[in-house]
Structure formats: C-alpha cells, structure tokens
Amino acid sequence: MTKEQILEKVKKVDGLGGMTVNERLHMTGLMDTFDKAKRQDKELARFILETIRVDKTSIDKILD
C-alpha cells in the first residue's frame, strides 16, 4: 500500500482523536497493513501511526 492510499483511508474517518490506536487502525482499515509494516518496514509503520495522529512518545513505545 502506498502512502497516498494510506492518506486516503485516513481522510475517510472522522473523530480519530477520541479513539485508541487499535480503534484508529481498525476504523481506517489499516490494521493488517500496520502489522505487516511493523515487522518489515518500520518507516512505513511510523508513517501510518503519524497519519492517524498518534503522538511521538507513543509511536516510539509501539515501535520499540
């Protein structure tokens, strides 16, 4: 999945700020993409988390 496709998926979901990280990934349809990226492409995993508005401290913990 390209970064542009990820951005499009995120744009379709309102109210991400009130959700947990897992809820955000599920609602945007990015759970499987993120799980794969977390294992194989940390840069893409970080991009996904930044795009769904996860704070830097949490991103660092998730990807550690």
Image (cartoon, helix red, strand yellow):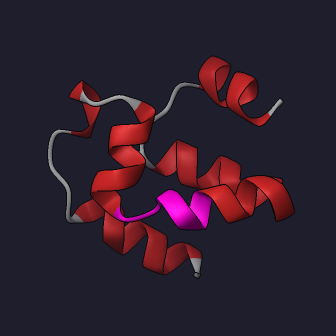
Outermost left residue: 14
Q: Is residue 50 left or right of residue 47?
A: left
At which x and y percent is residue 61?
72, 22
Above or below residue 31? Residue 46 is above
Q: In front: 15, or 35?
A: 35
Residue drawn at 42 percent across, 50 percent down: 25
Residue at 46% x, 62% y is 30
Percent position (x, y) of residue 12?
20, 65
The range drawn in magenta is: 29-34
Q: Quadrant of residue 59?
A: top right
* Residue at 81 percent of width and 56 percent of height: 39
Q: Nearer the viewer, residue 59 or 27?
A: 27
Q: Where is residue 21 in the image (x, y as percent from the top left)?
A: 44, 34
Image vertical order of residue 11 relative to residue 24, above or below: below
* Position of the C terminus by quadrant: top right
**Left or right of residue 13, residue 38 in this image:** right
> Please, is residue 55 above or below residue 22 in the view?
above
**Quadrant where the image shows the N terminus:** bottom right
Q: Which residue is drawn at 74% across and 26% down?
A: 60
Would you say residue 25 sits in the magenta stretch?
A: no
